[in-house]
Image (cartoon, grey):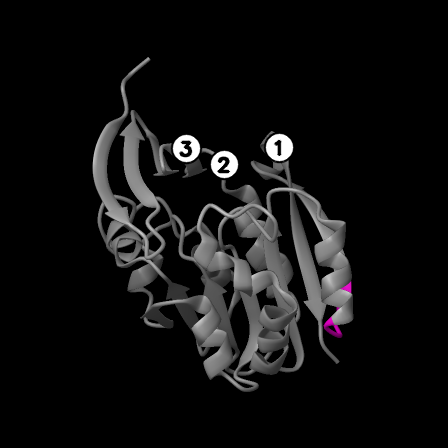
């Protein structure tokens, strides 16, 4: 087996070390030495965009927030389903992740950051939610491994009652909150209902038609 080649490294605000590595055609981002994401499995990230944007694809000039850039697959899928007059705001906490997506990772998802519909905000997605009052038609959160598995402690607040209340305020009437998770979480599902969302849960393969582990998409609908 080929050794991992280190392409870049950075430290998150809470001290987590993120490493961009490559082994042959596979790119892997590690968090404190443990795999966080890989370009081998991204079907469920694309499904996050498909389910999350289903309501807004026919809207005039929709505005969508993508929380967490990752390797760009959710952003690319979002752009692919939205109209030419859409705006997609990407909130990414770690500046190096943005630079990796403009460099070594750019071609994986067909250079989504170069799309003129995209606006990148480097900072906490929670702050982007709190700063918006009815500004988004859809919010897509792919931060960490979901509501209960925190690689970075800075992500905890997104999935609390307070974080969900901020998401509710940030959505326009009829808006959608879509949350990616590595697994089911009944407590989070109940928390969404308590926050006033009508909830649906979708289970998708990491590689969609090609198998892989099952991941969970939580969908919260507002009236």
Is residue 108 inside the magenta stretch?
no
Taking the image as shown, residue 65 lies to the left or right of residue 19, namely right
Quadrant into which the N terminus falls:
top left
Mark 1, secondary structure of its residue: loop
Residue 34, which numbered label? Answer: 3
Q: Which residues are magenta?
A: 195-199
- In this view, the residue farthest toward the top is 1
Q: Are marks 1 and 3 in contact (CB under 8 Å)?
A: no
Above-or-below relation of 213 to 130:
above
Q: Nearer the viewer, residue 188 or 205?
A: 188
* Distance from Cα at disc 3 to Cα at disc 2: 16 Å
Q: Where's residue 77, x and y in %?
A: 49, 56
Q: Where's residue 61, x and y in %?
A: 50, 82
According to the image, label 2 marks what residue? 41
Q: Where's residue 207, x and y in %?
A: 56, 36
* Magenta-drawn stretch, dominant element (helix, strand or loop): loop
Badge 2: residue crowd in 10 Å (few <14, some 14–19, many ≥20): some
Is residue 197 inside the magenta stretch?
yes
Q: Residue at x 46, y 45 (%)?
A: 151
According to the image, label 1 marks what residue? 213
> Would residue 107 be seen by someone viewing this image from the given angle?
yes
Q: Residue at x 70, y 56 (%)?
A: 188
Q: Residue at x 61, y 49 (%)?
A: 148
Q: Are marks 2 and 1 in contact (CB under 8 Å)?
A: yes
């Amino acid at each position: 087996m080929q050794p991992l080649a280190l392409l870049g490294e950075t430290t998150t605000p809470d001290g987590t070390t993120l490493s961009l590595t490559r082994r042959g055609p596979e790119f892997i981002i590690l968090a404190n030495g443990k795999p966080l994401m890989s370009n081998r499995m991204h079907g469920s990230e694309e499904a996050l965009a498909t389910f999350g944007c289903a309501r807004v694809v026919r809207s005039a000039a929709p505005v969508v927030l993508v929380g967490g850039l990752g390797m760009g697959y959710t952003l690319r899928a979002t752009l692919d389903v939205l109209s030419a007059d859409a705006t997609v705001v990407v909130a990414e906490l770690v500046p190096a992740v943005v630079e990796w997506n403009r460099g070594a990772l750019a071609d994986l998802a067909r250079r989504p950051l170069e799309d003129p519909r995209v606006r990148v905000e480097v900072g906490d997605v929670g702050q982007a939610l709190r700063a918006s009052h009815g500004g988004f038609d859809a919010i897509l959160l792919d931060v960490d491994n979901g509501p209960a598995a925190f690689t970075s402690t800075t992500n905890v607040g997104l999935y609390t009652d307070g974080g969900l209340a901020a998401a509710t305020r940030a959505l326009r009437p009829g808006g959608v909150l879509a949350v990616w998770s590595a697994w089911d979480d009944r407590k989070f599902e109940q928390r969404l209902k308590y926050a006033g969302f009508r909830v649906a849960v979708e289970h998708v393969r990491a590689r969609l038609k090609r198998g892989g582990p099952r991941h969970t998409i939580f969908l919260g609908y507002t009236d």
